[in-house]
Amino acid sequence: MMFPKLFIPGPTNVRPEVLAEQTLPMIGHRTEVFETLFARVQTKLRRLFYTQSRVYVVAASGTGLQEAAIRNGVRRRVLCTVNGAFGQRWYEVAVGCGKEVVKVDIPWGQAVKPTDVVQAIEREGPFDAVTIVHNETSTGVMNPVEDIAQAVRDAAPDTLIFVDAVSSLGGVKIPVDEWGLDVCLTSSQKALALPPGLALAAVSDRVLERAEEVSGRGWYFDFLVLEKYLQRNTTPATPAISLMWALDRQLDIMFAEGLDNRFARHAQLAEMTRHWAETRGFALFPEEGYASQTVTCVRNTRGIDVGALNQYLRSRGMIISNGYGKLKGQTFRIAHMGETTMADMHTLLATIDEWLEQQG
Ligand code: PLP
């Protein structure tokens, strides 16, 4: 079977040496070897998330921690900002957790602005927390989280700020403490370039204090339980040990590249992809000034057959993504997250050009 190089917004390509870490023999998780691994990974994660607090790692995908944020941090009322499919997912998670949820709906393709959030707080607050997706993978919009967080802190200092950075963390700088984020969550299979199966979240002291007052936190995702075990360099339930080895190795690879270099590479890849799209007669789907650095959502102004293009690409060992849900056919998405290089992107774009020429 031939495995195409992935230019889809997750899962992303994983380096062979990182995949290989998962073949290490199994160890018990109540052992010194595991605790040493856990402690080492914890130190590295605090550096990656730019936080002094803590980063929980759970065997789940990112959605699990969307749920954890709600169950631990929301007593009763939460404000969910929605400008795409993953903001909508978080809203549905909050409803599913039985909370009183107010939604701020922003048209797909536009960014959530600080004023949208502040107005909703003034109109319908107070809220225990607000949810924001940093990088809306369905539309290619990167929301201005730093400014939104600042505005929420000014307008309602007790409102916790929850950020989904599933498709950006590791590709874009997100200084969690500096921006004052209370939960910043991500998944392993996107810009971190690991296999799926781990969800990670930086969690502030404020959230732990809040959790003490919230009932119905469950157990698997109860931050107070996770914290108790984190203090002992371990996890309450059996961790995904093989993925932890892979994470340990991948973090070293990321630090060897240099985080700033890694973020700059993502920015360059995004710039190159946007330039390609615009010079080929396409337009960009996101509102100007808010285009993602990890995935470019192209408006299909030429009316190409995205499925046929992808078939052609697949025959040449690559794949991209069609538009998400209702945007299928109207847009297509080229991801540039994780380990993608400028050379990879040159090859991809040249191959798309080849196909476009054949179409005449
Ligand atoms: N949030 C965003 C922005 C995403 O892109 C995704 C998945 O694509 C999710 C949440 C859901 O993450 P997971 O599939 O890891 O649960």
Image: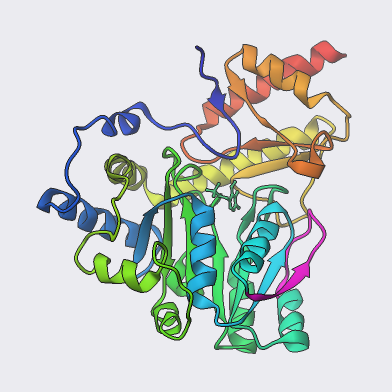
Q: Which residues are magenta?
A: 99-114
Say which residue appears at 66% left-offset and 68% top-offset: 95
33 in magenta: no
Q: Say left or right for 332 vs 70.
A: right
Query: In this image, 62 relative to 122: left or right?
Result: left
Q: Nearer the viewer, residue 70 or 330?
A: 70
Q: Is residue 65 above or below residue 121?
A: above
Apparent side of residue 150 relative to residue 286 in the rendered image (left or right): left
Q: In the image, what residue occupies the spot 44% across and 50% down?
A: 60
How far from the left and from the top, in percent, is residue 294? 59, 45
Answer yes or no: is residue 352 visible: yes
Coordinates of residue 238 in the picture (x, y in percent) = 28, 51
Closest to the observer, 237 or 36: 237
Q: Quadrant of residue 225?
A: bottom left
Query: Is the residue 22 above or below the residue 47 in the image?
Result: above
Q: Is residue 185 above or below residue 20?
A: below
Residue 174, can we see it?
no
**x%, y% of residue 346?**
60, 25
The C terminus appears in which quarter of the rendering?
Answer: top right
Is residue 355 positioned above or below 125 on the image? above
Q: Residue at x 75, y 77 (%)?
A: 115
Can residue 100 be found in the magenta stretch? yes
- Tell me how the rendering is colored: rainbow
Report the label total. Answer: 0
Residue 268, picture quadrant: top right
Residue 117 in picture, x, y percent from top left: 71, 76
